[in-house]
Image (cartoon, coloured by chain):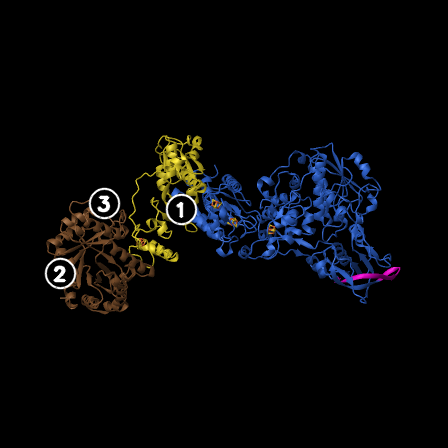
Chain colours: A brown, B yellow, C blue
Amino acid sequence: MGFREALYSGKFLITAEIGPVKGTEIDVLLEDAELIKGKVDAINVTDLQSSVMRLGSMAVCHLLKDHGIDPIFQLTCRDRNRLALQSDLLSAWVLGIRNVLALTGDHPTMGDHPEAMPVFDLDSVSLLRVICRLNEGFDMGGNQLKGAPDFFPGAVVNPGADTEAAFEMQIIKMEKKIEAGARFFQTQGIFDLDLFERFMKRVEGFKTPILGGIILLKSAGMARFMNKNVAGVFVPEPLIKAMEETKDKVKTSIEIAARLIKGMKDICQGIHIMAIGMEDKVPVIMEKAGLL
Amino acid sequence: MIVAEIKPFEEIKNMIKNYQKVLIVGCGSCVTVCLTGGERQVELLASALRMARKIEGNDITVGELTIRRQCDPEFIEQIKDEAAQYDVILSMACGAGVQGIAERFKDIPVLPAMNTMFLGVSDGQGTWVEVCAACGDCILWKTGGICPVARCAKGLVNGPCGGSQGGLCEVSKDVPCAWQLIYARLVRLNLQHFLKDISQQKKQPVRPRRLVREDLRLKKEPTKGV
Amino acid sequence: MSDKAIPLCQAACPINTDVPGYVSAISRGDLERAIRIIRQVNPFPSVCGRICTRPCESACRRAQIDEPIAIAALKRFASDQTKGLKVVQPPEHFYNETHMPTKVGTKENENNPPSPPFSKGGMGGFPGEKVAVVGSGPAGLTAAHDLTLLGYRVTVFEAQNILGGMLIEGIPEYRLPKDVVKEEIDYILSLGIEAKRGLSLGRDFTIEGLLKDYQAVFLAIGSQKSLLPRCNEVELTGIITAVEFLKQVSQGERPLLGKRVVIVGGGHTAIDAARTCVRLGSSEVTIIYRRTLDEMPAGKAEVEETENEGVKIRYLTAPVEFLGNGNVKKVRCIKMQLGELDESGRRRPLPIENSEFEIEADTVILAIGYIPEAETIKDSGLILGKNGTVVVKDDTGATNLKGVFAGGDVVSGPSSVIEAIASGKKAARAIHRYLRNLPDEKMEEYSAFRLLDDGIVKLISKSNMQKVSTLPIEKRINSFAEVELGYNFEQAVKEAQRCLSCGTGAVVTENCASCLNCVRICPYGVPVPGREIAEIDISQCQACGICVSECPASAINLKLETKEQVRAEMEDIINIAMKEAQEILTIGFYCQYKSPAGHPGGGNGVYWLGKLCTGRLDVFQLIYPFELGADGLVITVCPDQECHSRDGSRWLIKHIEKAREILDEIGIGANRLSIISDVEELSDFRKRLLDVGINPLRKGKKVKE
Ligand code: SF4
Ligand code: SF4
Ligand code: SF4
Ligand code: SF4
């Protein structure tokens, strides 16, 4: 059962995320994928995450497909203009890739080639539109395609935006993304279930499945760093404390994730686990969360 | 106005190293207004170059002139006699001015003393900020008079990227997120509904752009290059 | 509007003296420039510096902040200190057709060498034409002075054997020493004026007669006939008029007054007479005046000094009768009260019934009013007004007789010295136009600046007037030594530095690019964006010069010191230094507000340039000395809170940082430019400079070849 089918089946969705390496050694990546194969509904492959140059998302998605995993192809607007974006989408389709997550993307200055030209010819909303248009058999210029794809497009939303303006604009943009064709959302990492629940109430009427983001904590330091530097992520103080005081960081981190997942079961339609190097722990977490 | 800054002194010195007679031409418009290329700066640069070259034992003659605008040939024409007496012209105008002079005096190399930066406005004492990208397709009417093309690091036209923190842009952490400003302004103007419209993606203009107003021309022949 | 507007002090001065011009020269220690500016309009600087009624000081805007500038005392200082300096100034203000007082204190103005007629002792211009001046008081001599400089041959007729009129006879020595007057008159005469003494109008010559030999006559015979009170027994012995009394004393006589003297009147003459009595040894001197202190023509300060010397003043008191038998014994007085306003704008004093009382008196001196001596001119055909004053057509002084002009007290009735001088100047101008057949002209009317805005007043730090030291009271009795001692150098400079230099500030030229930088940085918020270019209201500008050094278009000029002046000054000093300095040549800029007495020292080989606030130095001025060949440059920077011009120090530090950056870039080295706060730091700097060596621009050349 692919991701799209799982979604329409109404089951509690589970996705995970892997980031390609900088280079060509893909063994570890594939091993990790192998570990979670069958336990998740799909795996996201990031697109030069944090603007760091590395192996491309499309190639890795293709490999996952070959390994029997349904990939979600993350596609950002940072590096490609509308020609390249559309062409890459068609390429992905012929390589068997079915799900696309449309993102604006980080600015190149955040990565390891800060002088790179930021393209942003399109943004996430217009990219979603383009995907739907391709599905209909036309490109952006209105030209007919010989053979059309049938992507399942998704997008991201950040429920933890810190100012009222930023929060309101997230909601507005979410609506726009739905209007432009987004069929599911994955969120930024959630640590405060009450806040998340409030957000979910607010967007109830949108009737689009939302997968709550789970980030595995590695240390208290990482939690603090995210609080300070990652927009929309807020790790509450008790969790930081727990990470600080524990003897077994991995164990505590797994416990926290499992607890959050359990809580989310009643709030949203699925989870999206960002293991960030702890991909091998995903099965344990799922077990603890009662998902296996 | 066009905002420009003076190039590093070393770079300027290097550009003119093979010349003995340099005419520095300031511009009395934008770059005077942004305090970088007017009469005062011409005087300072001239003195600095004279001294630097004298120390190297390679004296130069430096002429100093500031004209009203370097982007109009008629003003440039006014200095043709002076220009003829120099090996090279160092323009303290924006890139448009440099090219304006280069186009008039085709036999004299014209060098830029400035790096042209952006179209901006004053933000108080000694500060200028970029506010317009000259995109050729203005959308300010639906963004509360705040341009996301120029003022959002990513030039997003359909709302924020979601990366802002505390109202500041995720890219330059000391700059307000343009979309936060737009939101606040539209709310204030009671025009929030614009936020919900999906904006057409911007079109890239074909460069070089030109503006030909046939209603302002009697000549029939097509316009030339510069 | 601001074109014709001038500083309040200048506008209040009857001869529109360029006060900020000379005061600012004094504030920089440049007394020669100061006296040149003063002499441009005033041939009696030492006299006016002492006894002027100082309308300028009453108008001075500094009073909005604390106290007015002691303008007269500064004039006296400049004049006394430059004795012997022959500055013959063309009488600019009234003759130069294009002259505008806005040219205050510029070099161009002050260095004008006298053009030919002036330099030839008055014998140049129109030697065939002669003017007779009757009367040698301030009005007469001023007219003679100006006419001579214009090239006419002038003869002054004086009834007395000594020149000076009221200056000599009316004003006592302790206020205005005779030799000061004499020196000033000698100076005027030295321009080539003929003086005929002891010749009295009406007795020895007539106006009609003069007109045969002279092409014009200026009548300035004063107003010296005393009015007498309408009282009984005014002819008793022991009752004299103040004019007569002061005249006797001025001629060296020492009339016997007795112990008790009563003076009737409240004007300057009454006060002068009273203080003279004190000096002649009378122990009970009483002034009776029918109004109150507020109405007194004599200033409050003067009244205070008088009381300090022991004189009693009884206000609201008038004489009714003098009692005595041959000699006066008592004055019967009556108390007064103030009623309705009279035609002079003061409240009319009215006697209070049954309030009479008596004061004992050995001598009574009458000083209640003066009128011209009309007998001398009653047959001249001149139209006379009531009280015997000469009626003139307008303020040019032209009378009903062709070629005859009149001015001074004979026209106005008793007035001040400065009014007399003004009237002499106007007459000279009118006579010149008459003789040259020039059309009548309208005198330029200047309006005065408006007051400082409250917002600006708050930003200016307070500093009170420098006190002029005076002779101790005990030394004044039995002595005619001058009471006011005048300023010393440091006091004068400090006092001059209090001046707000009104009207010497910033002027925007058409070069303005409307960048509005000035609008953003002026510490006083004076510049405003105009419709086209920036506008600076010169009446509010504090002349700090900050905008001048920041304007990117170099479009602002400071009247106080032009860019050309600044550059020339610097070139001069470096030229001198290049000739004299040994090896290492250091230029120093110091703040003249911080060091009013002169540069901070630091030994030979430092060439100092004083600046009224070093904050005025722009980046160019900080690198230009090196281009001219200086090896080192030091600048005194005052602590921010002490900076005379708000923000001056802070901008200066920015400029220094920028200049150091440039010096590094061009290879001269930032270490040649340094801020110093005292002489010790200077000597450290100079030691370091020896290691750094001479300016690479000079390449091995010694300063002295
Ligand atoms: S944070 Fe705001 S201004 Fe910065 S890139 Fe994102 S949307 Fe643009
Ligand atoms: S402050 Fe100076 S310029 Fe201003 S009114 Fe007083 S004396 Fe005149
Ligand atoms: S600083 Fe100069 S150019 Fe700018 S507005 Fe003022 S006067 Fe004009
Ligand atoms: S900055 Fe100074 S000189 Fe300029 S306008 Fe203001 S007070 Fe006057």
* Label disc, if present, on residue A142 of the rendered structure: 3
Q: Which chain does tag 2 point to? A: A
Please tell me how crowded label 1 is: few (under 14), some (14-19), or many (20+) other residues with Cα within 10 Å.
few
- Which of pointers 3 and 2 lies earlier in the amino acid sequence? 2
Q: Is residue C222 above or below residue C320?
A: above
Beta carbon at label 1 within 8 Å of ligand 3: no
Q: Are marks 3 and 2 in contact (CB under 8 Å)?
A: no
Q: CA distance from mark 1 to mark 2?
A: 61 Å
Q: Residue A230: where, in percent of width, then height?
A: 27, 59
Q: Are marks 3 and 1 on the same chain?
A: no
Q: Nearer the viewer, residue C171 or A32?
A: A32
Q: Are marks 3 and 1 in contact (CB under 8 Å)?
A: no
Disc 3 on helix, strand or loop?
Answer: loop
Q: Residue B169: where, in percent of width, then height?
A: 32, 55
Q: Residue A222: where, in percent of width, then height?
A: 25, 62
**Segment tinted magenta in the rendering:** C312-329
Disc 2 on helix, strand or loop?
Answer: helix
Q: CA distance from mark 3 to mark 1?
A: 58 Å
Q: Are marks 3 and 2 on the same chain?
A: yes
* Label disc, if present, on residue C661 of the rendered structure: 1
In-image side of C574 versus C146 (left or right): left
* Residue C190 shows in this picture: no
What is the magenta segment's predominant secondary structure?
Answer: strand
| Ligand 1 image position (quadrant) | bottom left
- Let me know if residue C328 is in the magenta part: yes
For badge 3, the amino acid type reads Gly
* Residue C485 shows in this picture: yes
Say which of marks 3 and 1 sits in front.
Answer: 3
Residue identifier under label 2: A36
In-image side of B115 versus C170 (left or right): left
